[in-house]
Amino acid sequence: MLFLLTALVAVSLVSLLIGAGSVGPGRAMALLSGSQDSEAHFIVWELRAPRTLIGIVVGMALGVAGALLQAVARNPLAEPGLLGVSAGAAFAVALALVLGASAATLRISVAQLGALMGCVCVLSVARFRGVGNDPIRLVLAGAAFSGLLASLTSLILLYDQRAADEIRFWVIGSLAGRRLDDLLSVLPSMLVASIIVLLIARPLAALALGERVASGLGHHPNLIRWLVVACVALLVGAATAIAGPIAFVGLVVPFVARAFAGPDIRRTLWFCLPIGPLMVLSADIVSRVVVAPSELPLGVLTALCGAPVLIAVVRARRLPML
Amino acid sequence: MKPTPVRSSALDAASTRPARISISPPQGYWRLAWRSRHGDQSVLLERRAVTVNASLLGAFLLASVLYLSLGSVNVAPMGVLHALFGKADMMANFVVQELRLPRLAAAACTGAAFALAGILMQTLARNRLATPGIIGIDNGATAFAVASIVGIGVSIAPPAMALAGATTAAVLTFGLAAGSGTQGYRFIVAGIGVGAVFGAVTQLLLARVAIDTANAAYPWTVGSLNARPSGALQLLMFGLVLGLITALMLARSLTLLRFKDATASGLGVNVKRRRLEVLLLSVALTGLAVAVAGPVGMVGLIGPEIARSLSSSRGVPITAATLAGALVMVLADLAGRTLLAPIEIPVGIVTAVVGGPWLLWILMRPQRSFT
């Protein structure tokens, strides 16, 4: 844990120092140690610092949401991006924009509503005639659903040029150009979600032992499930509202966290907190450096590291049932 | 339109008997008999296959006339027929012959190629979800073709690069799934992973170039008939004809490949060799089609599904699937051009919107045997 936290601090520092523009690590370092450089000051504190903070929050939200969804679907492949939760959020935002909404605060609740719809759709598919018994089949259904929503979103964007201009850079998933205000406006819902997670962590661990054990221990499995779904929707909706749909973070982060923490969901959730930001920030840094002076969408890089993990999990001889 | 003589039993091409004995054909078959130098020859035609192929062909021709007549300038269906032979007024001649006919040809050929590749791959993997689009081969071809379009200094023709990309993706998917076989859902999800990597690579390539080049390449990455590289269509037509002939020649082995390996080789199929041939054919068709229209998803799934639901389960409905693919693609592009006019919806988005629910329905159906 200590190692992870140190790594997170180091990556945040690197994220402040490195960028696609002309202010390199040297100038940024000089600024941090007290020099007067107005250009560097603007770039580091006005552009990179908010971006780093947003990356940390988005990483935490997506990582925790992935771990929660995997626990409740009992499926190591359940991932908000793959199962269409992020796509649901993006679709809802696009739809709202076409119908005439444009306020930034509205976007967040709309995204969360869309994420909730996506979650409910996918989980009801999971309960449908034995799809849930086969983890891989659920992922396939989720991928189909996600692809459908993505094409509907691009259909909407084609139809409405104004909406397309407004969210073109948002819909591909990136941390560039997000303001601190966006972050502040999602903090309340993140806070609510964290409180719920803290409250249900124990019952959730009991649920991992099986439905009957959980109700024998005095918990209500259905209530827990609905709370988890609500949490995932709040977290993924908020993260998507800031950064756009980003896939594979919710798959990789719990996967790594479980390697550190073992099977207990409570420990896994704690480990997700530093690992999520680590992944998002590293991907973001690489996205700034690879094609400098332009930048890469964040989703591209998370897909590049996430897809091999997906393949590795699928290739494992026996899929670990959660 | 000659239906395959393949669905026959041991009776076909049967008699070299000296005396002509009339054998009544089995239930549901027509028997075509003729006399040649080598004696009496006969071929059994399955009635249902003939009807299905004929009606699909009819539907395709009808859709083609509609395709040629509708658009920003409407030409009456009869006017289309006149314009095809250059006998209408100049405007109609130009619109039909110069603008819509090449596009119709591209739509029909890509649809046919995707569907043919789809049904070959499905039969090969014994998995009805294993279409080239779903297991990442489309995306591989796209990534390589985009590389050749935006590539720095390299000017290899997009079709060649698309072929290379399709091969790479196929090798990766089959290689990664080698342990678990191709029949389950694992194979498909491994393919989705491979597809995601190549999709990301495509984005990466597009991010490196100037915004104008990237914008020009964008409709093509979702699958569109707007940006057809010159020469790719002729190559695709050539490949499609060749591929269809090869597939029909392989049809009997394909029917047997649906069984277990032991059964198939017991019935005289060189399983490994046939597999490799079918795989190569499917990959080549996918690569050529992607070079024309980009990764138009779901046609490789919908075409074979339509064909299978219409045909009997005796053989692999190769021609029916090809025709159904062409029909679906033509209708999808027609819808994309006309529904939201003057905005044009890329055909890949139309097929994804139609095909997504279809795929979900297949997944949620109670499980049946594959292929």
Image (spheres, rainbow, N blue to C red):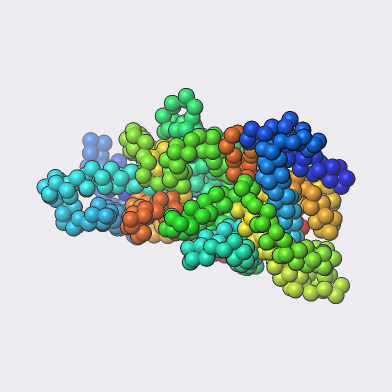
**Of B230 and B3, the residue lying toward us:** B230
In the rendered image, residue B330, in percent from the top left (x then y), is placed at: 33, 52
- Tell me which residue sits at (73%, 69%) in the image: A227
Q: Is residue B345 visible?
A: yes
- Tell me which residue sits at (54%, 38%) in the image: B207
Please, is residue A21 above or below residue A307 in the view?
above
User: Which quadrant of the figure contains the C terminus of chain A?
Assistant: bottom right
- Tell me which residue sits at (58%, 47%) in the image: B192
Give the total of numbered labels: 0
Please, is residue A289 above or below residue A98 in the view?
above
In the rendered image, residue B49, in percent from the top left (x then y), is placed at: 34, 55
Q: Is residue B22 visible?
A: no
**Of A37 and B115, the residue lying toward us:** A37
In the rendered image, residue A143, in percent from the top left (x then y), is placed at: 58, 55
**Of A236 and B32, the residue lying toward us:** A236
Please, is residue A173 above or below residue B176 in the view?
below
Q: Is residue A237 left or right of residue B29?
A: right
In the rendered image, residue B209, in percent from the top left (x then y), is placed at: 50, 34
- Tell me which residue sits at (66%, 57%) in the image: A181
Q: Is residue A30 left or right of residue B128?
A: right
For this orientation, the residue located farthest to the top is: B153
